[in-house]
Amino acid sequence: MQIHIVKSGETLSSIARNYGVSVTLLQRLNEVPPSGALAVGQTLVVFENARTRVVRPGETLLSIARSEDVPLLTLYQNNIFLSGRSDIEAGEELIVSLGEEQRGTLGVNGYAYPFIRPALLQQVLPYLTYLTPFTYGFFPSGQLVVPEDEEMLRLAPLYGVVPWMHLSTLTERETFDNALGSNLLRNVEAQEALINSVERVIEEKGYRGLDVDFEYLDRDLGQEYAAFITRLTQRLNPKGIPVLVALAPKTSANQQGLLYEAHDYRLLGEAANAVLLMTYEWGYTYGPPMAVSPMPQVRRVLDYALTEIPREKIFLGVPTYGYDWPIPYEQGRTKAVSVSPNEALRLARQYGAEIFYDERSQAPYFRYTTPNGMAHEVWFEDARASLAKFALAQENGLQGVGLWNLMRNAPQTYLVLHGAFKIEKLP
């Protein structure tokens, strides 16, 4: 696998010719528009040693898998553009094998809202170990707020993906409720009712793990939160259900701030079977333009986490999106808009912007100006940015990565994940 950076004057055809690969496959894998338009500085993922074949009349994806002696899942992973479809056309070119050795194995958890487009969900499921529908809320009584997760739970096992239930203090207003979580942790009876509800849903719906995400808790509740996670593991672990807890991105035990203080890395690491480091949102809607997940900050969080939590319990958070800021930035007034990597590339092409790469943050960015004179700055994730985070997780022996989230088109994230690593699949 190679990551090619587009230079001025290059075309899709010239790049494909230089690597000796199919221009059609290069285009389809990277979701380059039919016109072949590219932005200077953008990345393309190239599988230069792949073995390919052209579909013959009457062949199906299953018959090709059998004749080539490869798992059907592998064909979906090799050909992201299939998006779960089994109908293929004569003359269509497919990758049968990548022909390259992968670096190691990563567990991959992906989060998605129930309203995710089915085609997008089926496109990304082959690259996941776990799928976590977002989210189950709850009332003060302990009764659950149940999302419409049936279709996600139906599709996940078709791609060998294990579903995890997500429990959070998020409300219908898309904000985390401080009082809801804090009051629960002070009320053992309400906790017992909630745990009973969670246990019942897991059994009824076939979930095989629980992911807990309580944010903005009262500062003095670190021990109570860890005790709640312990109650969950004591109840669920005997049934083979692991419990993961999401952690705010801390760099020290005494880090100040409502987001951080009740998240005691050592206590929660001991209580839970696994943790997710939420290593993203440094660049965010109301902040100044910068990378969503800059590597120096990510490394500092991971370095601290490794002093408190066994590495094999850790999932590293990896974003699949970026932000578009109007500039100049004015604190308290400027609001960025979330964009997918594909949308960022579309903007760069539309406005003729050159994409640059910040080596320190290990993230791409560009500026453009609209016809009405409004300037913008965009930071997003590309193949280089994603690969850097996947490599960091693998090199440090982590359990894997958690993708936040699956709702946006980010094909290069999955191309480099599959091209460089073996994705863990559980029995």
Image (cartoon, helix red, strand yellow):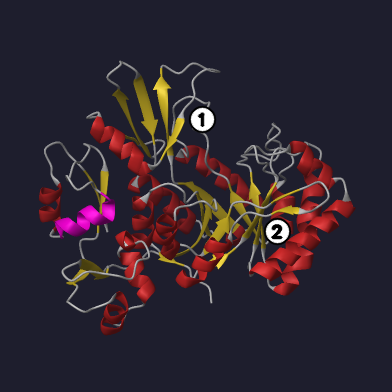
| Percent x, y of residue 56 | 17, 76
> Residue at horizontal 77%, vertical 60%?
197
| Sequence order check, earlier mark of 2 and 1 | 2
From the viewer's perspective, tell me whether residue 255 is left or right of residue 123. right
* Spatial CA span between label 2 and label 1: 31 Å
From the viewer's perspective, tell me whether residue 31 is left or right of residue 188. left
| Percent x, y of residue 13 | 11, 50
Which label sits on residue 94?
A: none
Could you tell me if the residues under marks 2 and 1 are in contact, i.e. CB atoms within 8 Å? no
Q: Within the image, what quadrant is residue 337 found in?
A: top left
Please tell me whether the stretch drawn in magenta is mainly helix, strand or loop. Answer: helix
- Give, as a three-letter code, the residue at label 2: Ala
Q: Secondary structure at mark 1?
A: loop
Disc 2: which residue = 272
- Give, as a three-letter code, the residue at label 1: Thr
- Magenta-drawn segment: 22-31
Which label sits on residue 285?
A: 1
> Residue at horizontal 24%, vertical 55%?
28
In the image, which is nearer the foreground, mark 2 or mark 1? Answer: 1
| Percent x, y of residue 340 | 40, 42
Reply above or below: 202 against 133: below
Residue 299 makes an appearance in the image? yes
From the viewer's perspective, tell me whether residue 41 is left or right of residue 71. left
Of residues 318 and 101, the one drawn nearer to the viewer in this rendering: 318
